[in-house]
Amino acid sequence: MRVRHHFVSRMSAAAVCCIAFAAHAETDPSFLLTATSKDLDAYFPSYLANGYFSTMTAPRGTESNLAYMVAFMDYAKDDISRPAAIPGWTEIDYSTGKSTAGEFWLNQVKLGAKAFRDYSQTLNMRDAMLSTAYRFTDDSRKSTDIRVTTFVSQASAHLAATQMAITPDFSGTVQLSFSLTLWAPHQPRFPIRTMTGDEMLSAVAANNMTVLEPVNHATPDRAPVWYHGDTHVLAKDGDTHDLTLWLDGQAEQGLSMAQAAAIGLPADLSPADVKLVKNQYQLGVLVSVPVQRGKTYTFTKYVAVARQNWGGGAKETLALAKAARQTGFDQLLEEHRKAWYQLWQSDVVIDGDPQVQQAVHSDLYYLLSNSTVGTAWP
C-alpha cells in the first residue's frame, strides 16, 4: 500500500487543467461503480454530495430521491433529533404521450428488460457524477434512448444539476415533468426519547413492523425506528414563463431553509404547453414539447438550496438557480470536476488488488462527499 500526495500548488494553472482533462478522458476503473440490467433486482442506492447537501440515487436516474442538508435537523418533541429530509430535487419524469394503449410515465413503469434495454448506470467517484443510460420502450411500443447525468457541485456549494437527454424513435409530442417532491411526514413516528427499549419494540410490533428482518435488500432492519425527519413547506410557487420553482420551509422545531429550481430547455425548442403543478406533495412544471424521430433533445434542472445561517431565503436561492442556468451545465460540470480533481490529489494506492483498490476509493469517495472545509454546525 502506498499513500500518494501531489503538491499541485507547485504546478501552473494551465498544467493542472491539462492533467484534469486527461484524467476525465480515461478514468481509472477503480473509481467506477457500474450497474447493468442484471443488477436491477439487487439495486442498492448510492449517494451524491458535496459536504453541504446531498441526494440518494435510484436506478432510472430520473426518480425523486431523499436528500439532506448539513446541520438541518428535526427536533420533534419526545423523539430523538433526526436529519430532516429536504424536498427531493432529482426528478425529471417523461411520457411519450397519450396513445390508444394509454399514457406511460417513465418513473412509473416497472423496471425490467422489456422496458429498459441496454441499461447501464455508473457512479464515477473521481468526478462525483452519476451517469445512467438505457433504451426505454413503453406499452405503446414507442422507444426513446435516454441519458441522465447528475451531480452535486463541489465548486459551488449551494448548487446541483441533473440533465436528461432523450432521442425518440418516433415523431410527436412528449411531456416532461420537472418537480420538487414535498415529502409527507413519516408515519408512524414514535416518542423514542421517552420510551424504553422494550416499549419501542412493542410499538414497532403493534404497527406490523420489525427491526429483526429488513423488508428488502436495500432497507436496513432498523428502518422502522431510524427514519428521516420532517421539513414543513411554508410557501411555494413557480413561474411557467420563466420555468422556475421556489419554496421556503422549516425543519420540525428546527432551522428554516429555501430551495429553488430553474429549468433549461433546448435553445431551438418551443414548448407546446407549460403547466404549473402545485399540490400538497409536489411543486413542478409540466412541459409538452414536439419532437422529431432520431433527434436528441437535452433538458436540465438547475437546483439551489440554502438554510438558516447558510445562504438566503427563496428569493436569493432562486437567483442562484437562475444564474446556474445562465452559466450552463457543461461549465458547471467542468468546474465541479476540477474541484474533485483537487480533492483526489491525496489518495491511497493499493498495488496488485483491483477489488481492494476500488473498495478503498469507495470509502474515500463517501468520506470526501460528506465532509468539507468550513462546514459549520449552528
Image (tube, rainbow, N blue to C red):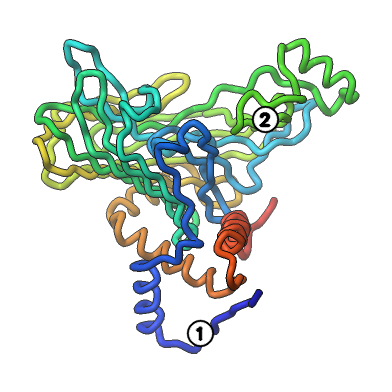
> Which image quarter: residue 124?
bottom left
Residue 164 seen in this snapshot:
yes
Q: Which mark is residue 208?
A: none
Q: Split into 4 quadrants, where in the image is the N terminus?
A: bottom right
Element at badge 2? loop
Please, what is the three-letter code of the amino acid marked with disc 1? Ser
Residue 103: image location, x then y, percent? 25, 17
Q: Is residue 106 above or below residue 336?
A: above
> For this view, does 290 lie left or right of residue 199?
left
Residue 231: image location, x then y, percent? 58, 31
What is the CA distance from the residue labelled 1 to the residue labelled 2? 43 Å
Give the residue displayed 9% in from the left and 30% down from the top.
171
Q: What residue sits right under mark 1 in the picture?
A: 9
Q: What residue sits right under mark 2 in the picture?
A: 227
Name the foreground residue: 361 vs 103.
361
Residue 327: image location, x then y, percent? 29, 58
Give the residue displayed 46% in from the left and 67% down from the top.
339
Name the foreground residue: 330 vs 205.
205
